[in-house]
Image (spheres, helix red, strand yellow):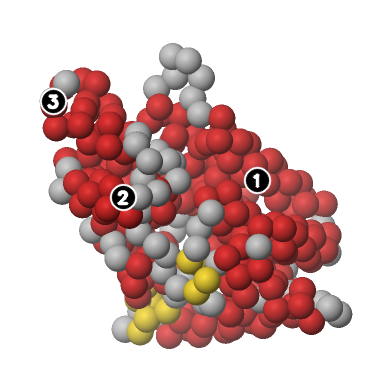
Amino acid sequence: MTVVGPFGLSVRDQALEADVQAGLAAVEEGLLEATKSEVPFITEAAQHLVKAGGKRFRPLLVMLASQFGDPYAPGIVPSAVVVELTHLATLYHDDVMDEAAVRRGVASANTRWGNSVAVLTGDFLFARASQILADLGPEAVRVQAVAFERLVTGQILETAGPQDGRDPVDHYLDVLGGKTGSLVAVSCRFGAMMSGADETVVDVLTQYGERLGVAFQLADDVLDIASDSHESGKTPGTDLREGIATLPVLRLRERAARLGLAEDIALCELLDSDLSDDARHAEALAALRTHPALEQARRDTVRYAEEARAALAPLRECDAKTSLLELCDAVVHRAG
């Protein structure tokens, strides 16, 4: 048994391991090539997060999904580069919106060069992704365009907040389906589609990716509260400090409204206060780490991971399917 990809995913079949490792290595080369510019400063900024590393979760899914067709088909590696470039671009933009200081264990681009450079670098990555995508055919362009619209819509809905009368948790889960689930679903779709897999297989893997993507983001929500910066690669409680209500906070507010417990209401008031104060921020983070709302968010993560697992049921048994199932377990483990 050997280990590849994020979270220590084990791959038991040597041929599959070789395919995945070779594919991810080719993606890495493709990312470096796609982020080069004739302007050295643009190259430096565009490669900032590429060289910082990362889990390469989405390219890994492209590689595993391609095993249900021809894993050596020419469009597989470029499509994996497209989804990772798109993901990286959103990180540059997210860090500006969240005023994040750290990303993947290094200074965020906005901290290093300012917001304008960070936003424009994200745009540069989107442009490079589009150039590669154009060579993959009109269907690939359409799939990516639909996903990108969902991604942006999810971000706008998060910024706007739920409409009056809308359950905040339901609204948030819809936001995650757009912001995260859409691109993870496309990763699985591209891998299967570019490999020439049957349309039914493509659909199954797309549904799996959608659910796994939401589970992945929910695990991030838990990590933002529960982990230290060494574990997560970014400053703990970033969302708290910026007043972004992720699932643990929404579950807390839901519980406070339902039970009316004084300690829950007090914690909600603390979260609604100015958390730019380090002491207040630390107090809120410590209180959430021991609150039942965090455990409820973990259970929500498990539920989506189990839905992803169930979606794979129609697929034939093979090592690639086993690895996809193990990713469900790995996401849950990541959330503790």
Q: Residue at x 43, y 36 (%)?
A: 173
Mark 2 or mark 3: whose residue is earlier in sequence: 3
Quarter in which the N terminus is drawn: bottom left
The picture places residue 48, in percent across and down from the top left corner, at 62, 75
Quarter in which the C terminus is drawn: bottom left
Q: Residue at x 21, y 28 (%)?
A: 265
Q: Which mark is residue 266?
A: none
Q: CA distance from mark 2 to mark 3?
A: 21 Å
Tell me the residue that label 3 is attached to.
Answer: 261
Mark 1 or mark 3: whose residue is earlier in sequence: 1
Question: Amino acid type of disc 1?
Answer: Ala
The picture places residue 99, in percent across and down from the top left corner, at 53, 54
The picture places residue 51, in percent across and down from the top left corner, at 58, 80
Q: Residue at x 16, y 21 (%)?
A: 260
Q: Which mark is residue 147?
A: 1
Depth order, front residue of 279/225: 279
Q: Residue at x 50, y 74 (%)?
A: 106
Mark 1 or mark 2: whose residue is earlier in sequence: 1
Q: Which mark is residue 281?
A: 2
Q: CA distance from mark 1 to mark 2?
A: 35 Å
